[in-house]
Image (cartoon, helix red, strand yellow):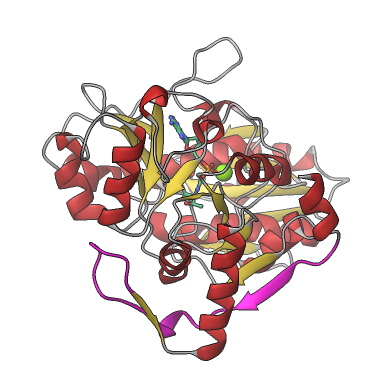
Amino acid sequence: MSLLRRQYPKMTEIAKISVGSIHFDDVGRIAVKISDKATSENLEKAASLIKSNHLVGFPTETVYGLGGSALNDGAVTSIFRAKNRPADNPLIVHVSSYDQLDRLIRANSNSESIPEIYKPLIEKFWPGPLSILLPIDIKAKKGPYKLSNLVTNNQDTVAVRFPSDPVARALIALSDTPIAAPSANTSTKPSPTLANHVYNDLKGKIPLILDGGNCNIGLESTVINGLVSPPTLLRPGGLSIKAIKQIKGFENLTTELTVTDDKTPVRTPGMKYKHYSPDAEVALIIKKTTTKSVYDAKEYLDFAAKFEDKTVAVVSQSHLQGKPSALNRDLGDDIKDIQFNMFRILRELDTLKVGVIFIVIDEATLADEDGLAVVNRLSKAASQKVYI
Ligand code: TXA
Ligand code: MG
């Protein structure tokens, strides 16, 4: 790490990627074709940084990732340091083909292929915003695809994802390396959905960020444990829970998330930490189905009065927009819009140095099972939750 610090004291390059110029032959083998010369050169540069155990910020369809070789202790240590992340919060390993997945499984466990339960699930949703837990056996680890124990903090499972974003897939394919990648934010901050979000958090700490534009989904992958019966949801995310429950073996998916405080054992370590918080204070204002107008309600006026001395931004669902103001933002209306917009808006309002962010959402929108990811992220970002 001291070597990395010396080499990259200040410079973090942002390299533009023409996403449409990247093509793949199939999902079985690694085969990538890139028609744009600058894109090809930038991806090759990123791949050689990964191969030499340096870090790269890169887009995925969910959020930007902070990638490093999952096979190398030094690279994994640098990831934890750059993000200021607690070492007991394990990382997701990203692959870009089934061939690569098989190699990873053979080198890190005693089995030859993926557990049966996952087959219909990944057939349907990979590549995509789904991470699954696979068993690993530390003692069985062998060969060139042996994972660093630091990725999993010596746990007996590893979370694996096959992203669909062409830039992510090309980077993994060209480096021919399973890439450990948490979201590319400083720990506790909202996840990044644009290259400049990564730059704001990690400038001077990593040599390169690939800029592939906006992340299509805007919220992290759904993490599933199919190794227990019934399977459990470890983190709600970009993949619909309802869609997962339609897959054979996952009909009874447990979606009750572990209550995470210091005394409760955690099933997914990341859930216990402060998360997704902008610098501004956040208040989640949930409009009950019976309320006619949020902003005229006495409860709202009383609540807002507590923040009279602060700059307040109001971020609301489209149909709940209040009076137009320079600090008001539109979250969109359905869950997909909200997922896409929320982290970007929180980060944008931080650059405007607002004191408080009110997030106004309908109770009915959040009550939908697929609203769970949004409830989860916004509840963690918010220090207060009020029903009006
Ligand atoms: O969409 C995503 O998943 C993004 C992009 C970059 O792929 N990555 C991401 O990683 O969100 P991160 O590190 O920010 O979140 C990983 C989550 C954490 O909650 C972590 O605790 C959990 O997955 N996790 C990772 N490995 C695990 C394991 N072996 N067992 C249980 N939970 C695990
Ligand atoms: Mg994260």
Q: Residue furthest right?
A: 309
Residue at screen point 80% across, 42% down:
307
Residue at screen point 36% across, 34% down:
108
Horizontal and vertical percent position of residue 68? 57, 52
Magenta region, residue range = 10-31
Q: Quadrant of ligand 2?
A: top right
Quadrant including the N terminus: top right
Residue 244 vs 66, above or below: the answer is above
Left/right of residue 305 with respect to residue 107 in the rendered view? right
Residue 30 is inside the magenta segment: yes
Q: Which picture quadrant has residue 211?
A: bottom right
Q: Which picture quadrant has residue 366?
A: top left
Nearest to the observer: residue 181 or residue 374:
181
Residue 64 is inside the magenta segment: no
Horizontal and vertical percent position of residue 159? 40, 38
Horizontal and vertical percent position of residue 140? 36, 27
Residue at screen point 22% across, 39% down:
114
Residue 173 vs 84, above or below: the answer is below
> Would you say residue 363 is visible in this rendering?
no
